[in-house]
Each structure stands twice: as structure tokens, then as C-alpha cells.
Amino acid sequence: MNSLLLRLYPSPWRARYGDEFAALLQERPLGPLDVADILLGAFDAQLRLRGHDTGLAHGKGFVMSLRIGGFAAILGAALWAVAGLVNSGVFVDVDVAVPSILLVAGMPVWLVALAGLSAHQARTEATLAWVAFLVPAAGTVACLIGIIGILVATDEELLWMMFALGTGIAIVGSVLFAIVTYRTGTLSRAGSVLLGVGSVLFLTIGNPNTQSIGAVGLACIALGWFALGVQAIRASGPAVAPRIA
Amino acid sequence: MASKVPEFGQFAEPSLLILVSLSDGPKHGYAIMQDIEQGTGRPMGAGTLYAALARLEEQGLIEPLPPVDRRRPYRLTAVGASNLAEQLHGLSAFAQKGLRQLGRTPS
């Protein structure tokens, strides 16, 4: 009887849950209501898994993307923090290009962090989270293309425009991401405040008179991403210590 | 009350009961069923249990542990814990509102 009921479930479901489900059915006698409940469960699984694999891979992928996003946030924060320190003159005999290289190296890392954390937040506020991902991501990509083009190819005005516009959009997007992160509340709110405030302050870094404020902004951004990364790694782990019943 | 939790359809209540059951530590399917029956006085069928477990796992709210004698324990993830807390706070606020409207709020 049990194996017959089990066969009503789709094969991907059986491959994933079949063994433990069969063990569960052996642990207590089945009444008519139990059989009806299993029939409904099998029908539900057939509807859900028609044309799909089990949700297991999706669930694992979700946790993994959050973890990767967390680590990327911390790495990006470290790169930008070092860039800020080098730029402030803490280290001597360092090439003037190093802060820029570190900032540029941090951008793709930041994109990974942004994607991982946005996927997490999209589970609560899908539209807002993806808008808050797309704006800074588009700005960062434009900025990267611009800066790499300037460094590698030519000094064309179009590339400078792309760099400047991309930077502006990335910073505005960063503020947007911070607001959405604060609103969803699924990650560190303190981190999102630091990121938002830091992004606004960072806008002033282009002005020689307010460069120190811009540096403080960069420090806030780095701290904000660090806090968000730590929270993401914590959230992707277990909530309680294993104590199997 | 704005919903900030994933949609579980008719498995919303079983999912909440499972999350509460796992909140004090990992359990396998049969232990979850027993715990829920003891807590609510109503049995949960195996079909309902596994439909809800699959959804919770898909949402990343619970995760499986290595099986022990074919019985696989599940545990709450940190995301699941914060999700559960959010749901319980929502229910608590709803219950308090109802009690206030009935004039039965403890003074």
C-alpha cells in the first residue's frame, strides 16, 4: 500500500523525498484520512513539479547566492577600505594609481555582492529589490567600461562621459539599494544606513575642497558593505545548534 | 496587515506549524508530526507535511541534514527564523487588536 501511494508522486519528488517519506509511512498505521491526505499531497507534487525539477536545487542555490553575496560584500568592502587608506596617504611609497586600481577591482566584486543580496531581498520585495539592483549595476557596468576604455584604449570624450555618468548612476543606485535594504529589513539596517549616508558623502569626492568628506563617505560605504556581508553570511547559516529529536 | 512572508497557499498554516516545531531544534518528519499533534491537538497528514516541507526548503527557510536511519532531520535556517519571528509578530499584533476590540485587553 505504501509503495503504491509513493508511486503516485512524480519521480523527481521520489528521488528527493521518497526514502524518508517511505520511512515515515512505516512509522504509523495509515487511516482513510491519511490516505486521502497523501493523495492530495501527490496531486500537489504532480502539479508543482510538472516540467520542473524539485525545488531543492533552487533552495540550495538561494542560500549559496546569499553566502556568495555576503563574502563578496566583505571582499569589496576590504578593497575599497584599502583604496581609501592608500588615498589618504597612510602608506608611503605607493603608486598613485593603486587606489584607482583597487576601486575598479572592487566594482565587479560589488556587482556579485549586489546580485547575491538583491536575490535575497527580492523574496520580500521583488520589484523594489530588482530595481535597486538594476540601477547601481547598470551604472557600475557603464563606469567600468568607461574607465577600462580610458586606461586601455583611448582618451575619448565618450568614454569619459560614460565613466562620469556610470559613476553618478552607480552612486544614486547605491542610495536606492540602501533604502530598499533598510525597508525590507532582512539584512543589517545599520549597514544600509552607513551605505546610504556614505554614498551621498562620496558624491563630494570630486571636489578638491571636500575630498576629506568624500573619503569619509568611502569609509562609510566600506563599513556598510562589511556589515551587510556579515549579516548575509550569518543569515545563510543555520539558526539553531543541531539537536536532533 | 502587509504580507512579508512567502506565499504558501493552502500550506501556509502547516508551514507555520512546522517552522514553530523546528524553532527549538532539528527534527525529522515523524518527530515534527508528533510535535504538532501534541501542540495543536490535531494530527498533520504525511502528504500535507511533505508538501509544506518541500515549499519551506525551496524558500530556504529550512534545510535538510544528513539522514539517520532513512529519517532525515530538518532544521530552521537563519532566514527561516527571522521569517517565523515576523509571522509570529504579525499574528501577535492581530490577536492584540482583536482582544482590544473585544475589550479584553489585560490592563
Image (cartoon, coloured by chain):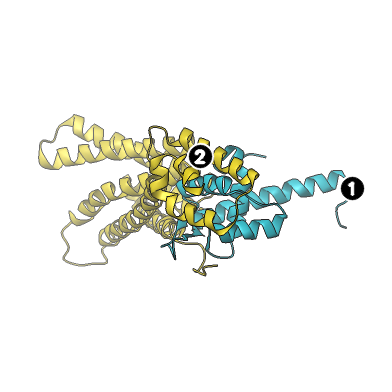
Chain colours: A yellow, B cyan
Residue drawn 18% across and 31% down?
A: A157
Q: Is residue A113 left or right of residue A184?
A: left
Residue B22 can be seen in this image:
no
User: Could you tell me which residue is drawn at 31 percent across and 60 percent down?
Assistant: A78
Q: Residue furthest top?
A: A158
Q: Foreground residue, A97 or B57?
A: B57
Label 1 marks a residue whose chain is: B
Percent x, y for residue B8? Answer: 56, 40
Residue at 31% over, 47% down:
A112
Q: In x, y percent, where is residue A216?
A: 39, 56
Can the viewer see residue A134 in this picture? Answer: yes
Please name which of the two marks, 1 or 2, marks the residue nearer to the observer.
2
- Please tell me whether mark 1 sits on a helix, a strand or a loop: loop
Q: Residue furthest left?
A: A153
Q: Nearer the viewer, residue A47 or B87?
A: A47
Name the amino acid type tagged 2: Ala
State the residue in front, B81 or A164: B81
Q: Identify the mark at residue B86; answer none if there is no mark.
A: none
Q: Secondary structure at mark 2?
A: helix
Identified by mark 1, the residue type is: Gly
Q: Where, quadrant-wise, is the C terminus of chain A in this rendering? A: bottom right
User: In this image, B51 relative to A173: left or right?
Assistant: right
Badge 1 is on which residue?
B103
* Mark 2, residue position: A42
